[in-house]
Every structure is written in structure tokens, then in C-alpha cells.
Image (cartoon, grey):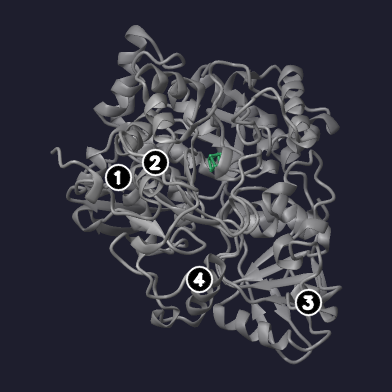
């Protein structure tokens, strides 16, 4: 048999119906649902007298709107309405829900893996573009719109055109102080926000193999920022060990059988991709974005670029617009840019290892005066684990606020908003205009870089702060 | 969704690349639980200043584009969040056709599902249209069946579209109903794989 990529293997296993000249009808193994992109889909079902075909393959939580302080006081009546609507819909259609009071509540892309719902070889969808996160396990997972949410609820399938395959190969090793977040930001800076459009990406190479499961999630999470609907990593022993004993993973003997199946999904030696892009792990520095999309970024030792240095007219214009919006001068060193806010959280960087890495930098230091710094764990489970090892204390003693789990300042749909004109070092995934609040200026960084910005008052190469303990 | 085949309308040129769905519809307007009523919030921060006054220099606020129904933009239009509120807002505002050199994948699908025709043309063709659309009343004529676009000045271009999406749009089909006709296939697949998460 011809060698195949994991992408082709999963695809072929899920074809329900194939016809010449049409996309394939794929079966969906897991459908994750949250409060913002689902109400219209449930309403559509009701209007057409349709049922949810497989409530047992559907799992819901509340994350986008939930407050991260005083959880039970939801000031915004419309946020509240979205949450109660989800509650009612889950009840009516028989869907399991981790609501705001539930011990499993958290950001949908943090809790899926945590509960063992996410498994290699599954097709996973959610009405949220960062569903690509689950690809870290070797699952084919992608974001869908609300009409597609309705389609999956009603049929448990989705029409999908066969995508092209793109290999992102990260060779060598990452240097000291360089994280998975820096890796993916560097890939996007090098190849652009458009590089993956029309493709499904697989990350390969030594630097990827070396990453922990949580780090792999950070990488796959941002596949969509490179334009790809899905990005995944072939499963290996780390994947299997992460899932062992998780609540929704197979147990006992069943687990061993599943593990065998999972490992067999890995891309075959010699399989071909439609396109391969490479980056050298050693060349990657801690990254900071300076513009208004995730590709507008560079290593911390660089300066804000001059729009004139870009070849294409369209790029010159958008960089110059971005610098206007960000209120930055070409030539300013990234290390000279002061910050007003620091946000550590989001489905990109709110897992236990992210919080540990940030705490290591924060420990024994103080958030600079005038800076608001908040830490928002990705789930209640992460929060409890972090508290059990005293990370909350380290953060609060250093002057950070310690919050409840949710999306929070990643998109500022609740009360966690960066005020107009203020500048934020953020571990989230999007630096679009107004993303963290109207007029807010977002710089994307890793958790240690965010903590370093909080304690020094400006972007700082975290390698200069860290004790060298290799 | 409403079927679409022959369509003509005034063209509004939005000369920006990588327009993300956070700009098309900012998140503070995602809180409705209906599909309607999003048009008023379309490109909110570009159309209005912090006090809610119209920004006169933004293209959509210029009188000549008031009744535009075709939006032309730069590459990678609709990137970012998967929010379907973006095509809902475009449609509700009055745009039935969007033309760009490329679209983000999820946004493109979301358009089709709502009867918005998203057309990919070459960068050169798009730039040409942007220029001509400076003139008041500039219209494009679209024929989905023949997959071509013309204007009154002799411009013609052909465009590609997946035959399946084309059929959907031409007929205004309800995709769920189409799929439910394949219930047999879905059931036999489910039997094959067994059940449970
Ligand atoms: S944390 Fe941000 S990016 Fe992730 S799901 Fe929530 S809003 Fe979306």
C-alpha cells in the first residue's frame, strides 16, 4: 500500500458518502458546543422540527461570556441570556453540559483534552476556529460556522471538500527560553496568515516531537492564524500516556487496544504532502507581535519594521495602517515598548505548564506600578491543580490577579476588557484591531514573556531574567 | 436560503487585505440569539467613531455606495474567528456578493450556507474593479450559471466554483434536508463503527 499521511488516513476512515463532483460527507465523532455560536443552530432545529442525532457525541460548556470574578453576578443581560439559552437547549436536546457551576467548566479547547474526550483519529468540530487545538492528539479537528453546527447536530456529518496537505517541518531543537508559542508565532511570521488556506497542516520534525502534549496544543491551536482550518501532529507515546486514565478515554484492556490503533495512525514513512514548509528550531527567538495580525511579529531582539521595507504595495499599506493603530514608530526596539496590561490565559496558553512557566518568572518579582496583570486558568481543573502547587500564591504575591476560568480578555466579551489606547502583552492568539476591547493594542507573546513584561514594565527578553538552569 | 443566479448591483470597493471577522462584526455584537439584525453592526469600528458618529472617510459611508450590494476586497477576506455573524451581517446590510482574490476557508463556507456568493478573481481583476468602482453607480453583472462577471464597459471575467456549492446556491437548497436523504448511508456507517464516544 502506498504510504499515507495521518490526514488521509483519518479522512478515509470517516467517509459516509462519496460521489463524483461533490465534497465528501464525513462522519463527526465529537461535537463540542459553547454558548455564543450555538443558539441560532438550536433554533433552526426547532423551527424544522429536527432532533439532535447523537447527543451522546455532543458535549457543551460555557466559556466565552462567563465572568472571571464574582462568577454568579452576570451584569450583562444578553450574556446571561446566551448562557441560560444554552442551558435550556442542552436540557431540551439531552446534551451533557459543564455549566458555570460545574467542576469541569472551562474553555472548550482546554477541557476536551483534559476529560479525554479528545482522542487520536477522531473527527472533532466546534463552532469556534481554535478547534484546531485538538489536532495535537492526531485528531482531525476544525472550526465550523453556525449553519454547520446545525448540520452536525441534525446529521452528525459534514460535507467537506478534500483539502490539500501541508507539512510544517520544524527541524532541530528550540533554544533556552523559547516556547511552543514562540515556535508557532515564528512560523506565522515567516509564512504569513494565508499560508495554510485550503490546507490541513501536519507539524513534523524533531522540535515538534520534543514538545509535551500541552505545548503541542499551543502549536495546533494557532493553525487557524496561518489560515489552515486544521493542524495536527501524529500521535506517539506521549499522546498515549497523556490520555491514560482520563475520564472519557477507554479504560483497561480497551485502552491498550485503542493505543495500538492510535499509534498506527501516524504518518507513514515516505508519505507525500502537497506542500512542505520548513523552519529551523534553533533560529527561533522569543517572539513579540507588533502589528494587527499574528504574522506581524518578530524575535524580541528586533525593532518595529518600516513599512517601506515590504515588497508588495498591499503589505506596505497594511503595515502602515497597523503601526498607526498600534501607535508605534518604525525603528523602535521591541524591548523599549512599555505595556499597561498583561493577560495570561486563553485556549492557547492557559494550561498548567503555561502557568508554571509564567510563575517561574514572576516568583520573587513584582508587577510594575500602573500595570494591570491578570492570570486566567483555562479550566476549573487547571485552576485547582495550580492552587494545589501554590502557583496562585506566587502570582498574587507578585501583584497579579488570580481569576476563575474562561475566555476572558482573549476576546473581551465579559467584563475583562483592555481600555481604549492601552497596550497589552497577551498570551492569546489574535491581535486584531479591537480584539481585547475597542481601541486596545494587543501584542502576542508566550506566558514567560508576558510575565517578564509585567515585572519589568516593558517587553523584555525573558532569557535575560531567567536563571540559567539547564 | 434564497437562491441566486443572475445578479447585478452597485460595487463598493474595500481596499484592504486580511480583513478579519472581528472587523466585519466586532464581538460585542455577538450576543444576540437570532440570525437577523446584525447589519447595523457591520464594520462597526470602521463605520463609526467612539461617539457613534459616522466616519465620513470610510468608503461604506460615502453616499455613492449607500445602496451597494457587491463588496470587493483584498486577499484573505474573512480570516480569523469562525463567527457566522460575519456573513449574517453582510447579508443583513445588503451585500449578496463578495469578490476578493482569496477568502479564509471557514468564512467562505459560511457565505455559501447563507446564500452569499463569494467569488475569487485574480488580484489584477480585483484591482481593476476597485479602480472602476471609484466612479459613482459602477455595477457588475454576475451570472452564476455561466460563472461569469461583466460590466457595461467591456470587462468580463470567469470564475471558479465547486459544482456542489454552485448547485446549492442556484437552487437555494436546505443542506440538512439533502443530507437527511442519505440517512441510510449514515446509519450503515454508524453500524459499522459501533457507538459511543
Ligand atoms: S480563549 Fe479566545 S480564542 Fe480560545 S475559544 Fe475562547 S475566545 Fe476563542
Structural distance between the alpha carbons of marks 3 and 2: 41 Å
User: Which badge, 4 or 1, comes first in the chain's sequence?
Assistant: 1
Residue at image point 77% right, 27% down? A85
Structural distance between the alpha carbons of marks 2 and 4: 27 Å
The reply to whether the C-beta atoms of the residues labelled 4 and 1 are less than 8 Å apart is no
The reply to whether the C-beta atoms of the residues labelled 1 and 2 are less than 8 Å apart is yes
Chain letter of the residue carrying label 3? B
> The N terminus of chain A appears in which quarter of the rendering?
top left
The reply to whether the C-beta atoms of the residues labelled 2 and 4 are less than 8 Å apart is no
Q: Quadrant of ligand 1?
A: top right
Structural distance between the alpha carbons of marks 1 and 3: 44 Å
Residue A163 position in % (x across, y down): 47, 52
| Numbered mark located on residue A218 in the image | 2
Query: What kind of element bears circle 2?
Result: helix
Number of other residues with Cα within 10 Å of mark 3, as a class: few under 14, some 14 to 19, many 20 or more? some
| Numbered mark located on residue A179 in the image | 1
Circle 3 residue: B56
Query: What kind of element bears circle 1?
Result: loop
State whether residue B115 appears in this view: no
Residue A196 position in % (x across, y down): 44, 57
Q: Is residue B191 left or right of residue B93?
A: left
Query: What kind of element bears circle 4?
Result: helix
State whether residue B189 appears in this view: yes
Amino acid at each position: 500500500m502506498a504510504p499515507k499521511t495521518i490526514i488521509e488516513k483519518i479522512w478515509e476512515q470517516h467517509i459516509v458518502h462519496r460521489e463524483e463532483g461533490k465534497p465528501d460527507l464525513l462522519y463527526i465523532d465529537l461535537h463540542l458546543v459553547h454558548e455564543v455560536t450555538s443558539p441560532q443552530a438550536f433554533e433552526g432545529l426547532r423551527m424544522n422540527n429536527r432532533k439532535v442525532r447523537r447527543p451522546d457525541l455532543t458535549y457543551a460548556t460555557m466559556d466565552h461570556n462567563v465572568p472571571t470574578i464574582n462568577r454568579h453576578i452576570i451584569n450583562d443581560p444578553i450574556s446571561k441570556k446566551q448562557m441560560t439559552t444554552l442551558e435550556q437547549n442542552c436540557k431540551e436536546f439531552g446534551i451533557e453540559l459543564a455549566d458555570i457551576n460545574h467542576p469541569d467548566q472551562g474553555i472548550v479547547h482546554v477541557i476536551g483534552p483534559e476529560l479525554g474526550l479528545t482522542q487520536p483519529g477522531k473527527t472533532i468540530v466546534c463552532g469556534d476556529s481554535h478547534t484546531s487545538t485538538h489536532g495535537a492528539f492526531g485528531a482531525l479537528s476544525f472550526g465550523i460556522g453556525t449553519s454547520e453546527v446545525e448540520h452536525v447536530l441534525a446529521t452528525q456529518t459534514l460535507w467537506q471538500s478534500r483539502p490539500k496537505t501541508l507539512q510544517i517541518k520544524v527541524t532541530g531543537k528550540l533554544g533556552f527560553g523559547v516556547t511552543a508559542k514562540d515556535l508557532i508565532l515564528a512560523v506565522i511570521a515567516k509564512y504569513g496568515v494565508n499560508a495554510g488556506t485550503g490546507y490541513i497542516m501536519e507539524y513534523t520534525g524533531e522540535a515538534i516531537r520534543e514538545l509535551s502534549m500541552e505545548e503541542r496544543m499551543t502549536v495546533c491551536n494557532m493553525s487557524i492564524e496561518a489560515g489552515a482550518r486544521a493542524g495536527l501532529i501524529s500521535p506517539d507515546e506521549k499522546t498515549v500516556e497523556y490520555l491514560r486514565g482520563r475520564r472519557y478515554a477507554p479504560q483497561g484492556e480497551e485502552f491498550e487496544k485503542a493505543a495500538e490503533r492510535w499509534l498506527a495512525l501516524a504518518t507513514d514513512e515516505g508519505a507525500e504532502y502537497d506542500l512542505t514548509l520548513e523552519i529551523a528550531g534553533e533560529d527561533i527567538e522569543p517572539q513579540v507581535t507588533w502589528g494587527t495580525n499574528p504574522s506581524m511579529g518578530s524575535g524580541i531582539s528586533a525593532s518595529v519594521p518600516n513599512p517601506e521595507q515590504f515588497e508588495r504595495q498591499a503589505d506596505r499599506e497594511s503595515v502602515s495602517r497597523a503601526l498607526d493603530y498600534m501607535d508605534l514608530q518604525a525603528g523602535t526596539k521591541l524591548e523599549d515598548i512599555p505595556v499597561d496590561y498583561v493577560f495570561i490565559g486563553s485556549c492557547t496558553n492557559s494550561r498548567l505548564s503555561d502557568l508554571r512557566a509564567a510563575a517561574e518568572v514572576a516568583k520573587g518579582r513584582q508587577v510594575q506600578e500602573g500595570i494591570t496583570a491578570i492570570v486566567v486558568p483555562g479550566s476549573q481543573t487547571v485552576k485547582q491543580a495550580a492552587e494545589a502547587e501554590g502557583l496562585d500564591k506566587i502570582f498574587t504575591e507578585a501583584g497579579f490577579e488570580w481569576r476563575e476560568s474562561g475566555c476572558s480578555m482573549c476576546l473581551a466579551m465579559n467584563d475583562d476588557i483592555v481600555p481604549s489606547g492601552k497596550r497589552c502583552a497577551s498570551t492569546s492568539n489574535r491581535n486584531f484591531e479591537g480584539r481585547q476591547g475597542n481601541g486596545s493594542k494587543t501584542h502576542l507573546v508566550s506566558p514567560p514573556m508576558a510575565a517578564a513584561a509585567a515585572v519589568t514594565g516593558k517587553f523584555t527578553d525573558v532569557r535575560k531574567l531567567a536563571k540559567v538552569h539547564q | 436560503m434564497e437562491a441566486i443566479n443572475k445578479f447585478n448591483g452597485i460595487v463598493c470597493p474595500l481596499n484592504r487585505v486580511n480583513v478579519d471577522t472581528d472587523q466585519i462584526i466586532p464581538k460585542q455584537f455577538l450576543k444576540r440569539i437570532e440570525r437577523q439584525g446584525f447589519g447595523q453592526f457591520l464594520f462597526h469600528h470602521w463605520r463609526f467613531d467612539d461617539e457613534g458618529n459616522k466616519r465620513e472617510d470610510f468608503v461604506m459611508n460615502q453616499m455613492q455606495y449607500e445602496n451597494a450590494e457587491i463588496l470587493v476586497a483584498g486577499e484573505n477576506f474573512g480570516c480569523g474567528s469562525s463567527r457566522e455573524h460575519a456573513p449574517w451581517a453582510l447579508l443583513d446590510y445588503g451585500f449578496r456578493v463578495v469578490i476578493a482574490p482569496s477568502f479564509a476557508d471557514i468564512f467562505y463556507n459560511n457565505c455559501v450556507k447563507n446564500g452569499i456568493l463569494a467569488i475569487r478573481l485574480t488580484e489584477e481583476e480585483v484591482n481593476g474593479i476597485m479602480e472602476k468602482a471609484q466612479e459613482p453607480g459602477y455595477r457588475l453583472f454576475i451570472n452564476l450559471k455561466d460563472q461569469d462577471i461583466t460590466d457595461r464597459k467591456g470587462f468580463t471575467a470567469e470564475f471558479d466554483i465547486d459544482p456542489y456549492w454552485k448547485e446549492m446556491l442556484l437552487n437555494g437548497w436546505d443542506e440538512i434536508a439533502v443530507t437527511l436523504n442519505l440517512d441510510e448511508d449514515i446509519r450503515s456507517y454508524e453500524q459499522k463503527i459501533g457507538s459511543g464516544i
